[in-house]
Image (cartoon, rainbow, N blue to C red):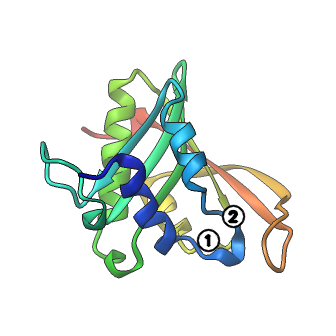
Amino acid sequence: MDDPVDAIMVVMREAFDSTYGEAWTRRQVADALVTPNTHYSLSGQAEGEPIVAERTTGFTLSRHAADEEELLLIAVRPEFRGQGIGTQLLKKFAGESIDRGVTKIFLEMRAGNPAEHLYRDFGFIQVGLRSGYYRGAVGGPLDAITFAFCLDQLAR
């Protein structure tokens, strides 16, 4: 039986391009998951069954404070992209955020990230730009774009 860190790391290893230095280490994920108000969701797992890391197709990792939540990471394994898993993960995340009393969610991404269409199609709007934020990227530094989504826009 695997644990949530195992499942997240299976996706992390495949989904994040090392060129940009965006992937978290196992230690960072494990530390985040024991931090209060940090939440995760996995796709590809059978509901109510033990976690099998290799079945994981995607994940979200977030943290919330008061009525706001930040989507720290969302990823789908490359072989499962284009099947709506990212959208399903966002919908689940948004619904769970509402259940936690959240009214607005934020995320930040590297400029040029191909997942930008996913966020914009979902209804996120750009609210900020951090020039040269990602300094560890090959060819960097790269800008970071901050997006927000008001959960009252979501029809449940």
Judge from the rendering whether residue 130 lies leftward or rightward of residue 20; answer left or right.
right
Under mark 1, the amino acid is: Asn
Crowd rating for badge 1 (residues with CA inside 10 Å; few <14, some 14–19, many 20+): few
Q: Which mark is residue 122?
A: none
Q: Can residue 149 be seen here?
A: no
Vertical relation: 26 (above or below) 63? below
Q: Secondary structure at mark 1?
A: loop
Image spot of residue 27 (x, y percent): 58, 48
Residue positioned 79% across, 63% down in the render: 143
- Residue at (60% x, 56% y) in the render: 25
Residue 11 appears anywhere in the view: yes
Task: Check if mark 1's residue and mark 2's residue have beta carbons within 8 Å.
Answer: yes
| Residue drawn where x is 36% and y is 76% of the image | 81
Residue drawn at point x = 14 percent, y = 54 percent: 46
C-alpha distance separating marks 1 and 2: 6 Å
The part of the image, by quadrant, that contains residue 131 is: bottom right
Q: Position of residue 52 (x, y in %)?
A: 24, 58
Compared across the picture, whether 15 is left or right of 87 comes to right
Q: Which residue is mark 1?
A: 113
Q: Name the quadrant of the C terminus.
A: top left
Front-lying residue, 69 or 25: 25
Q: Position of residue 113 (x, y in %)?
A: 61, 71
Residue 69 lies, with reference to residue 117, above or below; the image says: above
Drawn side of residue 64 relative to residue 1, left or right:
right
Q: Which residue is tagged 2?
A: 110
Residue 116 occupies quadrant: bottom right
Q: Residue furthest front?
A: 1
Q: Where in the figure is residue 129, as x and y percent of width and height?
A: 78, 54
CA neighbours of label 2 inside 10 A, class few (<14), some (14 to 19), many (20+)? many
